[in-house]
Image (tube, grey):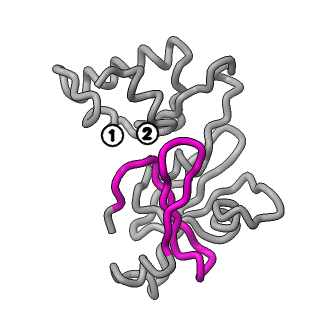
Amino acid sequence: MKTAEYLAMHPAFSLDEAERALAPAGGRAAAFERLNHHVGAGHLRRVARGLYAVVLPGVAPARFHPDPFLVAASARPDAIFSHHSALELLGVAHSAWTVCTAYLARWRRPLACAGSKVRFLDLPDAFRTKAATQVGTRTLERRWPATPVGPTSCGSSSISTGTPRRW
């Protein structure tokens, strides 16, 4: 796949996802070089180590604020968004917060996402089984490809940038 086609379909992604999709001859190093070229050209913004967001046309990369939900989903596809973040995804929040929260089976360091923060919380014991994490999940559209949203009955949701869900 050509890099421009990939960037048009994936607003946020990890280096691993890009390596699999682009399949350059030089492997991971070649994928990194290709992405690094686009960062330098202002088409991409490096959000964190191994995480990238596509800069919208007409926006300077330094002023671009990537969608924290899509960045979090790229960082951890198994994330289940919770608390106020779940309400935002469902469209019932009365305000937008600068902190995006998600449950994970394994802890991950928080991400700073240009004006907002993504916090990953430990998955509650009640949700540690495969069946329990799927309670009330559904898929919503979020600006780019289809994005799944999860346990709404508990005030939680999950999202992805179009990659298949694995529980």
Residue with the most extreme bottom position? 126
Q: Answer above or below: position of 105 versus 147.
A: below
The kind of residue tagged 1 is: Glu
For the residues labelled 1 and 2, say whether their Cβ atoms are less than 8 Å apart. Answer: yes
Residue 81 included in the magenta stretch of the image: no
Figure quadrant of residue 33: top left
Disc number for residue 39: none
Disc number for residue 17: 1
- The residue depicted at 62 percent of the width and 43 percent of the height is 67
Figure quadrant of residue 4: top left
Q: Secondary structure at mark 2?
A: strand
Q: Secondary structure at mark 1?
A: helix
Distance from the alpha carbon under mark 1 to that under mark 2: 6 Å
- The residue depicted at 40 percent of the width and 66 percent of the height is 106
**Which quadrant of the rendered structure holds the C terminus?**
bottom left
Measuring from the top left, give residue 95's x and y in whole percent: 82, 59
Residue with the most extreme left position? 25
Residue 142 included in the magenta stretch of the image: yes
The kind of residue tagged 2 is: Phe
Query: Which secondary structure class fits the magenta region best?
Result: loop
Disc number for residue 13: 2
Measuring from the top left, give residue 139's x and y in whole percent: 50, 62
**Which quadrant of the rendered structure holds the N terminus?**
top left
**Crowding near pointer 2: few (<14 within 10 Å), some, many (20+)?**
many
**Crowding near pointer 1: few (<14 within 10 Å), some, many (20+)?**
some
- The residue depicted at 58 percent of the width and 73 percent of the height is 156
Residue segment shown in magenta = 137-165
- The residue depicted at 54 percent of the width and 47 percent of the height is 70
Number of disc labels: 2
Q: Answer above or below: position of 93 versus 11.
A: below
Figure quadrant of residue 78: bottom left
Q: Answer above or below: position of 165 versus 23.
A: below
